[in-house]
Amino acid sequence: MGRTFYIGRLFRIEFRLHFTWFIIFFLVTLLLVEPNYDRLFYWLLGISTSLLFFTSVLAHELAHSLVGRANGIPISNITLFIFGGVAMMKHEAGKPGAEFRMAIAGPLCSLVIGGIFGLLLLIPAVDGPVATMIRWLAIMNGVLGVFNLIPGFPLDGGRVLRSVLWRTTGSYIIASRIATWIGQGFGYLLIFAGILIIIIRPFDMTWFDGLWISFIGWFLSISASASYRQIIGREKTRTSNDIELDSTDYTVLPSEREKKD
């Protein structure tokens, strides 16, 4: 992935930051700042909320990693980058059941985190700007969980779909090919939707919303193709020797337009 920075280790799994993460961290922090309060206060609140959100993304990837490791899939590291997070796996799941469990773990983790933040809003003492930030975290974790369940490979939902197709067809390659086609199609759809948003600006959306959605679509389409090539290359390698090649599990951030009320 290029230049990354080591930030820590948990459960024997390295956490790293890609240099592009600092761009999205800055943009999310700008989105969260509230100019109606003291300047220092709202910057600290914005930075804290942004850090909590990306900690949630790490938790999403960590859920994938721990379930994967429990199913015999070694995880070398988790890296945050501009489009979300990625877990580097030593190899893919060997059975469709393991693939399903690993894929579903991340979105479920995000939905649980979103629910916890939602429950915090029920505490009477939680109000004002702190309540606004907690509400944003609840919404964004919910959106993160639901968005990544969309059945477009290499999103988690695409991996869930592949596990079902794998069990149905009995062929990992056929299941991967179909999931890749769907993932590419979804990516192209997002690119087209983003361009439309830039042109017509529906529902008070901005040109940046459209640009971000198009970039996500572009990233998904090329990631789907790259992941499939990686799978084919691994299968060819497996026929000639026992060398293991790294694989990747992506978590993609949805549009950042969900702002504070």
Image: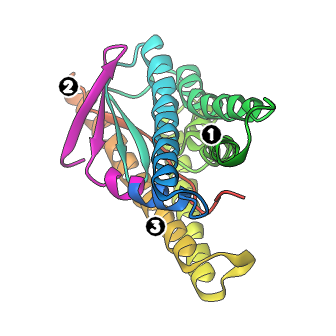
User: Mark 2 sits on what residue?
Assistant: 243
Quarter of the figure with residue 17: top left
Q: Tell me the residue at 47%/55% (across/down).
A: 29
- Checking the image for residue 215, the label placed there is 3
Q: Tell me the residue at 70%/43% (across/down).
A: 131
Give left or right: position of 192 versus 236: right
Q: Compared with residue 143, is residue 92 higher up or lower down, i.e. above or below?
A: above
- Checking the image for residue 221, the label placed there is none
Percent across and percent down for residue 144 are: 60, 45
Q: Tell me the residue at 74%/41% (across/down).
A: 127
Percent across and percent down for residue 228 are: 40, 47
- The magenta-colored residue range is 1-25
Q: Using a 10 Å C-alpha cutoff, classify the residue at mark 3 as few (fewer than 14 neighbours), some (14 to 19) or many (20 or more).
A: some
The quadrant of the picture occupied by the C terminus is bottom right
Q: Secondary structure at mark 2?
A: loop
The outermost residue toward the bottom is 199
> Would you say residue 154 is visible in this rendering?
no
Percent across and percent down for residue 16 are: 28, 35
Q: Compared with residue 119, is residue 228 higher up or lower down, i.e. above or below?
A: below
Quarter of the figure with residue 119: top right
Percent across and percent down for residue 151 are: 63, 47
Q: Secondary structure at mark 1?
A: helix
The outermost residue toward the front is 38
Q: Using a 10 Å C-alpha cutoff, classify the residue at mark 1 as few (fewer than 14 neighbours), some (14 to 19) or many (20 or more).
A: many
Tag 1: residue type? Leu
Q: Using a 10 Å C-alpha cutoff, classify the residue at mark 2 as few (fewer than 14 neighbours), some (14 to 19) or many (20 or more).
A: few
Q: Nearer the viewer, residue 191 or 135?
A: 135
Of the numbered discs 1 and 2, the one sitting upstream in the chain is 1
User: Mark 1 sits on what residue?
Assistant: 161
Q: Nearer the viewer, residue 146 or 44?
A: 44
